[in-house]
Amino acid sequence: MIQITAQKIDVAWLMEQVEDDQAGAIDVFVGTTRNNTDGKKVVKLDFEAYEPMALKELQKIVDRASSRWSILKYAVVHRVGVVEIGDKAVAIAVSTPHREDAFLACKFIIDELKKTVPIWKREVFEDGDVWVAAHP
């Protein structure tokens, strides 16, 4: 399951999406909106996406992860629109038979998402705003 949404992300619901009787592990990554960047106060974030391409790119990433690790089920959700401080901006859940695959697959998906998926972030400060690259 892959979604891009303007709605708040429900992590409990996300975990339910990947539950599987064969799973020995579920790994969840949640990216949240922090209140500062380089010592400058962030008021909120605003995400925009080219949704059709973003969904296709996310599916490619999950397919690549599935070819490397034993993923039973996955769920990837990314917010668009205004995301307030402390809110979840992205969440990824992966179930696998063993924990190492779950950790590695989840890390791979978020790292690749940041590199290639057309989702852009605008950081809004008290005195202005700036579009920033998603890459760390």
Image (spheres, grey):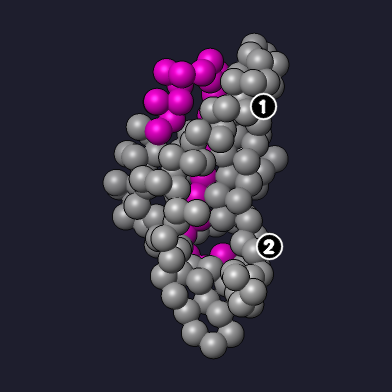
Left or right? Give the position of 48 relative to 12: left
User: Residue most toward the left?
Assistant: 53
Looking at the image, which residue is at 66% across and 15% down? Answer: 98
Looking at the image, which residue is at 63% across and 46% down? Answer: 30
Q: Position of residue 120 (x, y in %)?
A: 40, 60
Q: Position of residue 92 (x, y in %)?
A: 57, 39
Q: Are marks 1 and 2 in contact (CB under 8 Å)?
A: no
Which of 7/101 is in front?
101
Label whose residue precedes the other's in the sequence (1 or 2): 1
**Residue located beneath label 1 in the image:** 26
Q: Secondary structure at mark 2?
A: loop
27 above or below 36? above
Name the amino acid, label 2: Gly
**Residue located beneath label 2 in the image:** 86
Which of 103/62 is in front?
103
Looking at the image, which residue is at 35% across and 32% down? Answer: 60
Q: Is residue 68 magenta?
A: yes
Residue 20 seen anywhere in this rendered image of the structure:
no
Magenta part of the chain: 61-83
55 above or below 71? below
Residue 125 seen anywhere in this rendered image of the structure:
yes
Q: CA distance from mark 1 to mark 2?
A: 23 Å
Q: Position of residue 36 (x, y in %)?
A: 64, 70
Q: Position of residue 38 (x, y in %)?
A: 60, 70
Name the amino acid, label 1: Ile
Looking at the image, which residue is at 65% across and 64% down? Answer: 34
The answer to which image quadrant residue 130 occupies is: bottom left
The answer to which image quadrant residue 8 occupies is: bottom right
